Structures are given as C-alpha cells and as structure tokens.
Image (cartoon, helix red, strand yellow):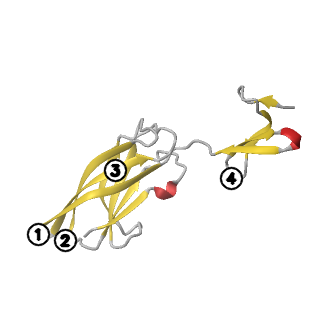
C-alpha cells in the first residue's frame, strides 16, 4: 500500500524514525529502487558568548564589565525566559569551586531561529584577576529543552 506525498507524485510506502532520531520517508521509484528521504527533527538550541570585557582595578578588587550575547541556533523559537550565569574560575573548567559573580534572567521568550539577545553585566572580583577565567553558562536553569546542551558554556580568560 502506498500514499502520495502532498501532490508531489512521490509514492510513500513507509515512514518513521531511525536509530539516530532522524525522520525518514521511503519512496519506491521505478524498477524496484527504494529512496530514503530523511530530515532531522526541528529543535531549539541556545548558545552564548561574553564580549567587550573591560577591567578597572579598584584597590583590592577588579571591576569587570562585559556584554553577554545569547543566540538561538536551533530552528524552532524559544518559548520561555532563561537564566545566564557567569562564574569566576581559576581554570577553564566549571566546577563547585567556582564563584558565581553574575546571574540574570534574559528575554529569550519568543526568540526566533537565529535570533540574538544581549545583556550587559558587571562583577566585582578579587584583584588581581588577570589569568583567571569567566565561564558563561547559558540556560543555567535548564528551562529550554535543547538539541545540544553541550554548547551552553563559553569560557574567556581575563587579560
């Protein structure tokens, strides 16, 4: 039994999801040939970065100012607000010893595919901060179900 795919002339005899999570349609062509047409399911995905970092020494503290950019690199809109957090770290790995220096909810709700939102941040950290790292964690509250949770960290060494 076959079905025509939306007035395309393609006769579809099977469809489903493969082991990798890709959707497929099986089209039986002429002379018994089978063609598989696959597509990845649509998903949301946030990523971010820290830029425009400035550092002003103030006695025993360094005053840091920066701009955080969050982008939806997925192909579905984001439908909720999300948290960004910035940690101060002695190394380039986020762990329990790192100090939270900035936390803000960003307006990712209704952020379409390819959309970008920015927010300014400030932090006061112990001096000297040179050589330490700022680690940005995007979607820190895990409100967005994403296709790639592994791209939610951005690391910047303080000059």
Q: Secondary structure at mark 4?
A: loop
Above or below for 63 versus 130: above
Distance CA(mark 1)–CA(mark 4): 55 Å
Task: Please name which of the two marks, 2 or 3, marks the residue nearer to the observer.
Answer: 3
Callout 2 touching callout 1 (CB < 8 Å): yes
Q: Residue at x 24, y 60 (%)?
A: 53
Near-viewer residue (77 or 121): 77
Distance CA(mark 2)–CA(mark 3): 26 Å
Name the residue that disc number 2 marks: 127
* Mark 1 burial class by Cα count in 10 Å: few <14, some 14-19, many 20+: few
* Mark 4 burial class by Cα count in 10 Å: few <14, some 14-19, many 20+: few
Name the residue that disc number 3 marks: 69
Distance CA(mark 1)–CA(mark 3): 30 Å
Near-viewer residue (72 or 141): 72
Q: Secondary structure at mark 2?
A: loop
Q: Secondary structure at mark 1?
A: loop
Of the 4 image quadrants, the one containing the N terminus is top right
Near-viewer residue (40 or 70): 40
Q: Residue at x 32, y 57 (%)?
A: 50
Is residue 75 among the parts visible in the rendering?
yes
Near-viewer residue (55 or 122): 55
Q: Residue at x 49, y 48 (%)?
A: 45
Distance CA(mark 2)–CA(mark 1): 8 Å
Callout 4 touching callout 3 (CB < 8 Å): no
Residue 66 pos. (x, y %): 25, 56
Above or below for 89 versus 152: below
Residue 49 pos. (x, y %): 36, 56
Mark 1 or mark 4: which comes first in sequence? Answer: 4
Q: Secondary structure at mark 3?
A: strand
Name the residue that disc number 4 marks: 20
């Amino acid at each position: 039994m076959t079905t025509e795919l939306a007035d395309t002339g393609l006769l579809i005899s099977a469809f489903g999801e493969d082991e990798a999570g890709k959707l497929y349609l099986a089209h039986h062509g002429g002379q018994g040939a089978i063609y598989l047409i696959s597509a990845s399911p649509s998903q949301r995905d946030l990523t971010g970065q820290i830029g425009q970092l400035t550092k002003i020494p103030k006695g025993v503290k360094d005053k840091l100012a920066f701009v955080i950019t969050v982008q939806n690199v997925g192909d579905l809109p984001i439908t909720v607000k999300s948290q960004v957090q910035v940690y101060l770290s002695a190394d380039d790995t986020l762990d329990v010893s790192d100090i939270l220096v900035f936390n803000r909810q960003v307006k990712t709700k209704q952020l379409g595919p390819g959309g970008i939102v920015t927010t300014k941040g400030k932090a006061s950290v112990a001096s000297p901060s040179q050589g330490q790292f700022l680690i940005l964690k995007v979607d820190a509250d895990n409100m967005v179900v994403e296709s790639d949770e592994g791209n939610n960290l951005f690391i910047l060494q303080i000059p």
